[in-house]
Image (spheres, coloured by chain):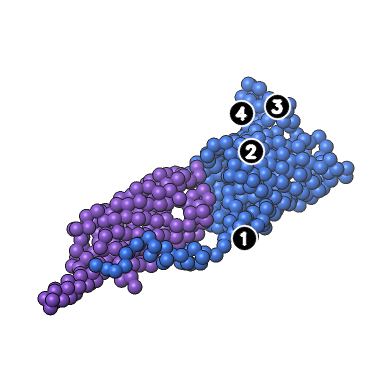
């Protein structure tokens, strides 16, 4: 017969009262602002985790207003195949080849700022993205002058600023500079500036709708081109993200889709297309040390 | 009078003798691990800082575990696990179990050996409390107990509904393994 009246609950309370105090106040970093590394055509602020490789297929068909003869564009297609790799959690690089203009492109995307709440507050995620593009289509046989390599090169620099407003809604701004080493005549600008805006809204746990628009500043815009608009649906499954898109944008890398889109969205020059992302974990993580 | 005094002392000594084995037992380093298996992925994590009490007299058990104390082989997994869409450990920092050994009379805390037990009580995870029951073994070595049990819970019963892209990688039924070695509580 013990004198004390054992109450395990009060004993437990006294033994654990300090454990929560030991918890350091934490910073909550926002994750999954977008479902994948692209919004539709253009990049999102998402970077791949370290050691992850993303195999990407971008498919763009012909325009819907091609009519039934062209199977509403499905008879024509351009494709881009790319491999993206996460060097660190904040640095993603990629390399791809597109059938449109037989263009090779490579890029590096670095996450400079991360949206967070808690101890350290940052309202947005900010990435810097640099791309290098090379058009490798052969000169026509009639051309006596051989286009030098450097004249086939384009570069672009983008700053991606995004904010995840809620679990369902994210918005991104992308001021963009596309540089042409060579332009057709002296009346055109070598540096084209565009302002992009994009966003996504979840509609179910698996699906989201997204939109992306790049506005070429009138001062540097290439004549005869239009701004590209892209509307899309994201579908997520284990390991894959499927993006179905409708866009007047031609091509996939910043040049040409930002600067050389000739179709007009509301006149039916709409290309149906899709992006498939398949992520592979290449490097196993080291075992975590107990805190 | 003398006989009563002897009888009283005898009863006192006897009650002390049996009560040593009835003293509350305790650990700060109990182990709880969980396991989820799906065709896509197996997920495992371990917590070695479980606080647990065992009262042999009433057969009562208490477990308390810090969610942030679960260690995963992949860092990103541990981040996700604690996140708002998963365990939300900032809002619900601990999981608790309160229960009683239903077949207490089958266990002799004074005698070394392994005793099969059923523990019934309530489990609180992610802020949700539900009745829970587990079968396990209490092994007595030198008067001290160690408890081992394996049981399954459905994480959705506790409101842990994970985002869509993860739901096929994280099973609904999670297998929980408890392994605690107790010492005397001073």
Marks 2 & 4 on one chain: yes
Compared across the picture, whether B87 is left or right of B30 comes to right
Observer-nearest of A60 and B175: B175
Q: Which chain is blue?
A: A
Residues tagged 2 and 3 counted as in contact (Cβ below 8 A): no
The residue wearing badge 4 is A75
Q: Residues within 10 Å of mark 4 (few under 14, many from 20)?
A: few
The residue wearing badge 3 is: A268
Which numbered disc, 4 or 1, marks the residue closer to the eye?
Answer: 1
Please name which of the two marks, 1 or 3, marks the residue nearer to the observer: 1
Residue A80 visible to the viewer: no
**From the viewer's perspective, is the residue at label 2 or at label 3 nearer?**
2
- Rendered hue of chain B is purple
Q: Marks 4 and 1: same chain? A: yes
Chain for numbered disc 1: A
For mark 2, what is the residue? Answer: A210
């Amino acid at each position: 017969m013990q004198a004390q009246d054992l109450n395990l609950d009060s004993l437990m309370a006294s033994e654990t009262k300090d454990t929560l105090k030991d918890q350091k106040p934490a910073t909550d970093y926002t994750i999954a602002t977008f479902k994948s590394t692209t919004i539709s055509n253009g990049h999102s602020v998402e970077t791949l985790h370290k050691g992850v490789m993303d195999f990407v297929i971008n498919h763009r068909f012909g325009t819907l207003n091609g009519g039934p003869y062209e199977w509403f564009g499905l008879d024509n297609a351009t494709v881009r195949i790319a491999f993206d790799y996460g060097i660190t959690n904040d640095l993603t690089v990629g390399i791809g080849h597109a059938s449109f203009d037989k263009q090779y492109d490579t890029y590096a995307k670095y996450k400079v700022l991360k949206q967070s709440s808690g101890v350290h507050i940052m309202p947005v995620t900010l990435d810097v993205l640099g791309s290098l593009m090379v058009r490798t289509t052969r000169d026509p046989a009639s051309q006596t002058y051989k286009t030098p390599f450097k004249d086939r090169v384009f570069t672009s620099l983008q700053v991606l600023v995004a904010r995840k407003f809620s679990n369902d809604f994210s918005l991104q701004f992308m001021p963009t500079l596309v540089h042409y080493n060579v332009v057709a005549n002296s009346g055109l600008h070598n540096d084209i500036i565009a302002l992009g805006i994009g966003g996504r809204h979840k509609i179910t746990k698996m699906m989201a709708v997204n939109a992306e628009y790049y506005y070429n500043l009138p001062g540097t815009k290439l004549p005869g081109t239009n701004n590209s608009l892209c509307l899309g649906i994201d579908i997520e499954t284990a390991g894959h993200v499927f993006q179905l898109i409708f866009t007047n944008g031609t091509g996939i890398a910043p040049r040409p889709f930002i600067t050389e889109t000739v179709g007009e969205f509301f006149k039916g020059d709409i290309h149906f297309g899709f992006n498939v992302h398949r992520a592979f974990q290449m490097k196993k993580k080291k075992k975590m040390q107990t805190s | 009078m003398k006989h009563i005094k002897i009888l009283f002392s005898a009863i006192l000594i006897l009650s002390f003798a049996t009560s040593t084995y009835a003293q509350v037992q305790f650990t700060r380093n109990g182990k709880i691990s969980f396991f989820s298996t799906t065709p896509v992925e197996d997920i495992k994590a371990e917590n070695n800082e479980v606080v647990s009490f065992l009262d042999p007299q009433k057969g009562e058990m208490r477990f308390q575990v810090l969610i942030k104390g679960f260690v995963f082989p992949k860092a990103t997994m541990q981040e996700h696990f604690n996140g708002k869409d998963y365990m939300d450990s900032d809002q619900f920092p601990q999981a608790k179990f309160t229960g009683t050994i239903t077949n207490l009379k089958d266990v002799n805390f004074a005698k070394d050996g392994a005793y099969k037990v059923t523990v019934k009580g309530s489990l609180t995870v992610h802020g949700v409390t539900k009745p829970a029951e587990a079968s396990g073994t209490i092994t007595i070595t030198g008067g001290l107990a160690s408890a081992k049990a394996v049981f399954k819970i459905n994480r959705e019963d506790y409101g842990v509904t994970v985002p869509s892209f993860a739901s096929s990688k994280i099973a609904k039924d999670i297998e929980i393994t408890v392994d605690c070695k107790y010492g005397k509580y001073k």
